[in-house]
Amino acid sequence: MDSLLYHSIWFFLVFFLMFSVYYFLLIRKIKKNKIMTIREFAYLIHRFSLSQNKLPFKKVGLVICFLNAFILAFVSTFIMLLPLHMLWRLLIAFVLLFALIYALYEIYGRHLKKYYKKG
């Protein structure tokens, strides 16, 4: 039970810390009108043929902050649970990180395409 509590606290701590950092950086980019320098926005717009004018940047930015924080927190917590050598943990983390990034951004991009089509 202590292990589950420890890993849950670790997950929420990493999630909150990463979400705070991403949100702070997002607010700075919005204030400087450099929202398109965020690679996630550029990727979603290019990959799913979205219109820049139709997207609510603050709402999309908040979801991107949430996704990035979730991915990092999940991977770090999952890797801590594995009783493997450090090299195997790093390899699994690398594969899992890219798989989650691709999968979650694909799902979110399809959701955005459904509601904010170009044209």
Image: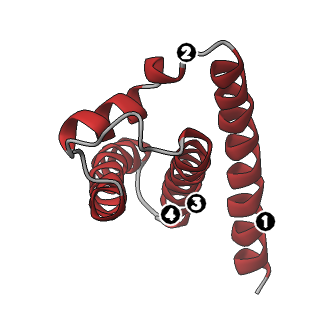
Q: Foreground: 29 or 116?
A: 116
Q: In this view of the protein, which residue sits in the foreground, 62 or 18? A: 62
Secondary structure state at the residue bearing disc 3: helix
Of circles 3 and 2, the one toward us is 2
Q: Earlier in the sequence, mark 2 or mark 1?
A: 1
The image quadrant that residue 23 belongs to is top right
Residue at the farthest front position: 119
Per the image, label 2 sits on a secondary structure element best described as: loop
Q: Which residue is depicted at the point 75% across and 30% down?
A: 24
Position of the N terminus, as image quadrant, is: bottom right
Q: Where in the figure is residue 52, as x and y percent of width and height?
A: 38, 34
**Numbered circle sitting on residue 78:** 4
Does 94 appear above or below 4?
A: above
Pointer 1 residue: 9
Q: Amino acid at mark 1?
A: Ile
- Residue 108 in which image quadrant: bottom left
What type is the residue that disc 2 sits on? Lys
